[in-house]
Amino acid sequence: MSDRSIELCGVALRGPVLNGSGTFDAIAARRAFGDALIERFPFDAFVSKTITLAPRQGNPPPRLWETPAGLINSIGLPNKGLDGFLGSDLPELARLPVPLIVSVMGFSRDELAILVAAVGQRDEVAMLELNVSCPNVETGLVMGADPGETALAVERVRTETEKPIVVKLTPNAADPAAIAVAAQAAGANAVSLVNTLKGMALDPETREPWLGGRSGGVSGPAIRAIALQQVAAVARRIDIPVIGMGGIATGRDAADFLAAGASAVAVGTESFRDPAAGRRIAAELAGLSLTGERPAPASTSI
Amino acid sequence: MSEPRTLAPPERRVAVVSGLERLGAYDLITAVDTFGPTDPRPGQFYMLASPSRWGGGPDERPYLPRAFSYARARVESDGLALSFLLAAVGPGTARLSELVADDGLALVGPLGVGFRPPAEGTRPLLVGGGIGAAPLLCWQEELDDPPVLLGFRSASHAQAAALFGPDPQVVTDDGSVGRQAFVTELLAAELDADPLATVYACGPPQMLEAVRVLCAEREVSAQLAMESGMACGFGACFGCVVPTRDGYVRLCVDGPVLDAAVLETALVPGAGH
């Protein structure tokens, strides 16, 4: 056993590389790859796609647009809803060889509380992640873009479970560190960032929005520098662990996020290019830290 | 009946390009895959990328791998020789068409679910449009000399028909090879002669929709190999959905071959780009 293992919010992980929520569907991947996926599972903990109380179809296609070194997606959180998740997905995800973190989103604080209570009481679930990148239908404010909204949401769900709660921060906020501070004060056990940045693309022929949802979220190496800055800014202001992500494609990228203050990292869009990206990045990261090498930066000049 | 799906190794690997054959407007690229399964099913696809200089083209693309149904698979001493039909229409396909022998070809696959056997008591009819002929080539080899109906834009595109041996019926948009007609006219004539058929079709969205409508009118079973923009190919991104009578399905894990009966339309927004 290597010394890659870490403890995150009291949960033992065999290493520090997770997947970003919504960037890997372990159930679909098992249909494509069979048991080899389980034997060579790419992540050290698995974060589910976000579930909502009611089932959702997701946004109309087209849902994707390739950008320079990245991707805009407008998926719209398709999922089976809480009952469908608990009944059919959770038993499948419980068979994964790593701890399970379930991502939930509510369109009101009460809805969020129902989700956290129902998911939090399941033994198969190690931690919960709150996706707060959505408007609160009661206030119209995006929960995760406003420190007060974030604090109220975390306070509301904090009493519903004793399991660790991770708050997934959106980069589309004026001051993500202020949101993180509010989340910590309200009882969050960790924060993860960044979610995608808002973006759009136009149909080259019609000049109308290409995506069925009109706008979407940008991910991939295109946003890595922005993500790294936000992780560093957040980590300076809070004491709870930070899970850093945003365009991580190599072990060096992961090492940067850890050096910026993250306790763990997540891989997202890079998994689209290689389903084993998480494993490769973990191996590259372990190689860097085992040798203690500090390879010369690719470029120090601007 | 088990579904025609051969499992893929859960990682990207690199095959070695053994040849690039120019077929008029298309290239047939062949690469030897040493580490993958040797029994992909016709209709399944691979996600392809170049291991080097993938990016840096127009608009600094490509970034994501590109999905291709395989056209031919041959077991050789050093692995599986996989052939893909390419047309350089964007930054990804342009980069792939630059590859030469001994270059690497990064791939994940085979992915998705392929063609299912013909319905009991029916004969297979293969209908291809343009580059959509690709998955029909390996399917033709598994069937007993089925009729192959192909439509192409022009004579240079129609050179791909030579892959199918001496028998395919070919029409073109400009009449430069065969009649000036849509391939669905050939299909209608075949169904007039013998309506007990299972139709296998792959091609541009407008052609697939015409095939779907024709087969629905005549109550003929049809399987459509469809396309949609994909980021991953294995169900991770939820980007490649097509609407069906049962809601959206991900083409990469529930297709790319879909029974035409589940579709209200084969015109999927964004497909064909």
Image (cartoon, helix red, strand yellow):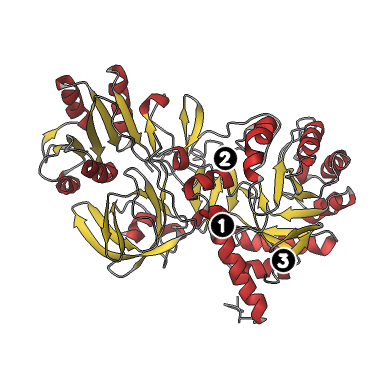
Give the vertical position of A28 relative to B33 (above or below): above
Are dots 3 and 1 on a single chain?
Answer: yes
Which residue is depicted at the point 22% across and 39% down? B143
The chain holding disc 1 is: A
Q: Quadrant of residue B130?
A: top left
Q: Where residue B224 appears, x then y in whole percent?
A: 34, 33
Q: Earlier in the sequence, mark 3 or mark 1?
A: 3
For this view, does B155 lie left or right of residue A216? Answer: left
Q: Amino acid at mark 1?
A: Glu
Q: Where residue B41 appears, x then y in whole percent?
A: 34, 45
Secondary structure of residue under mark 2: loop
Q: Please state the total of marks drawn on the protein image.
A: 3
Q: Residues within 10 Å of mark 2 (few under 14, many from 20)?
A: many
Q: Amino acid at mark 3?
A: Ser
Note whether residue A269 is visible. no
Q: Amino acid at mark 2?
A: Ile
Circle on res. A75: 2
For this view, does A57 lie left or right of residue A168? Answer: left
Between disc 3 and disc 1, the foreground one is 1
Are dots 2 and 1 on a single chain?
Answer: yes
Q: CA distance from mark 3 to mark 2?
A: 33 Å
Q: Nearer the viewer, residue A172 or B26?
A: B26
Note whether residue A32 is visible. yes
Give the vertical position of A4 relative to B154 (above or below): below
